[in-house]
Image (tube, rainbow, N blue to C red):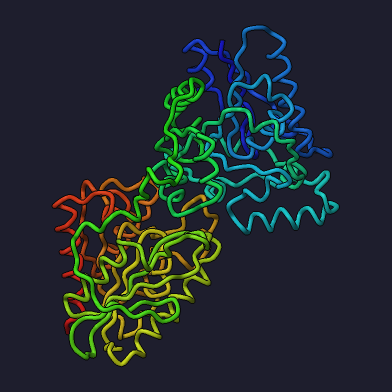
């Protein structure tokens, strides 16, 4: 018999699993929920000197009670913070664990505390300050549970009903600081245990986006691809046991049987999506490289209008080729150069979501370098953003300069994603629309976009309509994120031509 041992995340206890556990039981599985010390009893549970080792011991106690009965196949499920005590316990009982399931939980590392995985920087700082007040290591200290309005700082609340959110708030308990601050210690034995990740696509990337990140060289995800980790998706927010209990039960059952999709490691037999040919056969153009910037030049001395193409990310620092040589960027640059505008590709240093500041500075410097070139008409410039480069748009939507004639974006991220912890960042294009004035915008939407990114685009479009901002939308109904190399259909080709024509039209005056 399969026995699911379910470990809840920060501030929560066994009660969150009620509906999912009932469905798993109805399907013939056995379910045990772990009451983590200081959390399992709800509000007012004793914190004392509770740390991560305390919670590992809690999980070990349940594992040992199950393992004492013959014929049990143990599947350990960790949600959110819960993955840390799950790994600590599995490392010490690797021989009796059939599988570990990460339920919308990040990766863990030996010697790294759970606090490092908290997405919101301000929350990490708050916990660190509380630890100092309570005596350095956080012994006896507690992090207060979120208010009803603050749960989104810990993960997307998508699909939670008002009643579920109220219940989550009412039953939440303070999180003992020691559980977040004590480093996880692993011997390495847990590496032998099969792993499945259940991705909540309303809160973070899905499998296709992970594959893109593997392809561009993300070392942590490359390791997951090499290890054959399986992945399943749930189209909901960070608390699927409350928002989609039936679907979660089915996903856990499939995970226990080894189901799911696996990432493809880079290799000779796999051509990364971002390095496949551009969907249009565009002739080469004269190309000049200066610093981090390439100019794809039209015919004639100029001055010509310019379109600056800003790649997405994060892209690992060691990725080769660098983005300015990727077929999508060079394809667009050649395309506009053939129509009489300078096409600009560049590299910026968005190597992690915490590095938008330096990436934005790289883009700003590149734009000024382009405008200073005598072959460029400094008063006729457009910026075109892609994917994770979208948040950088915010700087240019905020009181745009008169020489900026248009801003375009393809399958962009237009607000910080819930898993980034950057809700208060300046890199928030939706909010920046209030200062965009009459700047024309061109938005290319991928119909098969991931749920988390599509939500930011919908929010942006709604805000633009509310503020009567000039947005021309070009839809690619069957297109995926990065459709220019993934989906070379006639409809996609027409969408590219239409988008280019829309941008160039705004540079013609």
The answer to whether residue 14 is seen in the rendering is: yes
- Taking the image as shown, residue 161 lies to the left or right of residue 385, namely right
Q: Is residue 370 above or below residue 53?
A: below
Residue situated in front as seen by the camera: 339 or 39: 339
Coordinates of residue 248 in the picture (x, y in percent)? 46, 27
Q: Residue at x 35, y 48 (%)?
A: 271
Tell me the quarter of the picture where residue 109 sits.
top right
Tell me the quarter of the picture where residue 471 sits.
bottom left
The residue at the far front in this view is 268
Residue situated in front as seen by the camera: 311 or 290: 290
The answer to whether residue 438 is seen in the rendering is: no
- Taking the image as shown, residue 251 lies to the left or right of residue 139, namely left
- Looking at the figure, which quarter contains the N terminus? top right
Q: Is residue 111 above or below residue 335?
A: above
Q: Is residue 31 above or below residue 54?
A: above
The residue at the far bottom in this view is 374
Residue situated in front as seen by the camera: 258 or 42: 258
Residue situated in front as seen by the camera: 21 or 293: 293
Tally of numbered tags = 0
- Taking the image as shown, residue 11 lies to the left or right of residue 283, namely right
Coordinates of residue 9 in the picture (x, y in percent)? 62, 36
- Looking at the figure, which quarter contains the C terminus? bottom left
Q: Residue at x 17, y 57 (%)?
A: 493
Coordinates of residue 476 in the picture (x, y in percent)? 21, 52
Q: Residue at x 43, y 50 (%)?
A: 215
- Taking the image as shown, residue 36 lies to the left or right of residue 2, namely right
The residue at the far right in this view is 135
Coordinates of residue 190 in the picture (x, y in percent)? 67, 31
Tell me the quarter of the picture where residue 421 sits.
bottom right
């Amino acid at each position: 018999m399969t026995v699911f041992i379910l470990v809840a995340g920060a501030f929560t206890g066994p009660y969150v699993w009620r509906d999912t556990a009932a469905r798993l039981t109805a399907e013939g599985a056995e379910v045990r929920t772990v009451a983590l010390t200081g959390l399992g009893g709800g509000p007012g549970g004793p914190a004392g000197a509770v740390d991560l080792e305390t919670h590992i011991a809690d999980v070990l106690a349940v594992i040992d009670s199950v393992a004492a009965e013959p014929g049990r196949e143990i599947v350990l499920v960790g949600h959110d913070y819960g993955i840390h005590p799950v790994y600590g316990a599995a490392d010490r009982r690797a021989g009796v664990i059939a599988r570990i399931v990460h339920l919308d939980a990040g990766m863990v590392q030996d010697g790294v505390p759970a606090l490092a995985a908290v997405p919101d920087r301000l929350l990490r700082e708050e916990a660190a300050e509380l630890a100092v007040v309570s005596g350095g290591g956080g012994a006896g200290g507690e992090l207060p549970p979120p208010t009803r309005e603050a749960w989104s700082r810990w993960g997307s609340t998508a699909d939670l009903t008002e009643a579920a959110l109220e219940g989550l708030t009412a039953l939440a308990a303070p999180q003992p600081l020691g559980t977040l601050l004590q480093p996880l210690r692993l011997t390495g034995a847990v590496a032998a245990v099969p792993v499945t990740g259940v991705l909540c696509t309303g809160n973070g990337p899905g499998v296709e986006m992970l594959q893109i990140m593997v392809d561009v060289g993300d070392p942590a995800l490359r390791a997951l691809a090499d290890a054959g980790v399986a992945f399943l998706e749930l189209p909901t927010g960070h608390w699927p046991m409350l928002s989609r209990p039936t679907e979660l039960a089915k996903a856990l059952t499939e995970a226990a049987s080894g189901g799911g999709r696996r990432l493809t490691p880079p290799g000779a037999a796999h051509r990364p999506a971002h390095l496949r040919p551009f969907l249009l056969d565009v002739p080469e153009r004269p190309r000049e490289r200066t610093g981090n910037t390439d100019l794809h030049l039209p015919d004639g001395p100029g001055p010509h209008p310019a379109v600056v193409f800003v790649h997405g990310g994060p892209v690992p620092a060691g990725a080769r080729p660098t983005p300015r040589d990727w077929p999508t960027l060079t394809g667009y640059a050649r395309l506009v150069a053939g129509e009489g505008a300078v096409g600009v590709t560049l590299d910026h240093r968005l190597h992690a979501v915490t590095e938008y500041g330096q990436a934005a500075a790289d883009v700003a410097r590149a734009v000024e370098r382009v405008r200073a070139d005598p072959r460029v008409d400094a008063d006729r410039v457009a910026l075109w953003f892609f994917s994770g480069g979208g948040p950088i748009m915010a700087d240019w939507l905020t009181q745009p300069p008169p020489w900026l004639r248009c801003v375009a974006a393809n399958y962009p991220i237009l607000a910080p994603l819930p898993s980034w912890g950057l809700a208060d960042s300046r890199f928030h294009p939706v909010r920046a629309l209030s200062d965009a004035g009459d700047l024309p915008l061109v938005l290319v939407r991928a119909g098969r976009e991931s749920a988390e990114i599509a939500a930011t685009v919908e929010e942006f479009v709604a805000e633009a309509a509310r503020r009567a901002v000039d947005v021309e939308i070009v839809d690619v109904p069957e297109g995926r994120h990065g459709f220019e190399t993934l989906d070379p259909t006639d409809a996609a080709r027409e969408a590219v031509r239409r988008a280019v024509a829309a941008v160039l039209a705004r540079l013609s005056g």
